[in-house]
Amino acid sequence: AFKLVAERSLHRLVLAGLDGGGGDPDDSAAATRIALHGLGGAGKTTMAARLVRDSAVCQAFDRVCWITLGTSPDFPLLRQSLFRQLTGGSAPPQQAAADPAAMLEALKGAARGQRVLLILDDFWENQEKALNPLDPSDGRSRLVATTQIRRLLGTRGCAEVEVGPLSAGED
């Protein structure tokens, strides 16, 4: 039952403030950054995967992107993958591929004007700035991070959903 409550909370947070997505378009205080946190194996990735397969969620966003990081991510490769997801398959600009700052600007340009749901799976400290192209003031996009670290995204414009260990009937 705890897992179902957490999953409903996540769904509600992601759609809050979005018109056409089942959320309340007048909810201007909607969090644009949401952390799913809990122990390894608690079901955070599974919960995020179910979220991105939900039809109301898919309809609420122009792009749904998924990046798995881990403790030692290959940022250049992940940035290229994210660029392709944001653009529907286009390769990133040649001059940006070798320069992390230029690539982040290219990612921001690709995300601009779109309603993006970005899942950063297995997210650890000091990774957001290297990969997140979303403007935190744009209430039409959402970042969802699965992590083992509480308050990793901070508290400003961020909500957290705690995911407890799976019980025998929830796996």
Image (cartoon, helix red, strand yellow):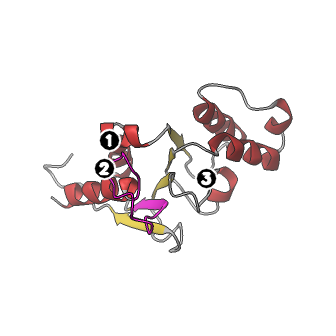
Task: Mark yes or no: residue 152 visible.
Answer: yes
Report the residue at 53% width, 73% height from top. 156
Q: Which residue is mark 1?
A: 56
Q: Look at the picture and state if 131 lies above or below 54.
A: below
Per the picture, the main secondary structure of the magenta-coloured stretch is loop
Report the residue at 32% width, 51% height from top. 43
- N-term mark: 2 or 1: 2
- N-term mark: 3 or 2: 2
Task: Mark yes or no: residue 54 visible.
Answer: no
Report the residue at 69% width, 47% height from top. 108
Question: Hey, what amino acid is under mark 3?
Answer: Leu
What's the magenta region?
Answer: 17-36
In front of the other: 170 or 67: 67
Pinpoint residue 100: horizontal percent, then vertical percent.
79, 47
As helix, strand or loop, the secondary structure at mark 1 comes to: helix
Report the residue at 84% width, 43% height from top. 99
Q: Are marks 3 and 2 in contact (CB under 8 Å)?
A: no
Q: Which residue is mark 2?
A: 22
Q: Which residue is mark 3?
A: 134
Q: CA distance from mark 3 to mark 2?
A: 21 Å
Q: Are marks 2 and 1 in contact (CB under 8 Å)?
A: yes
Please state if 60 lies on the left or on the right of 95 as rendered: left
- What label does residue 116 carry, if any? none
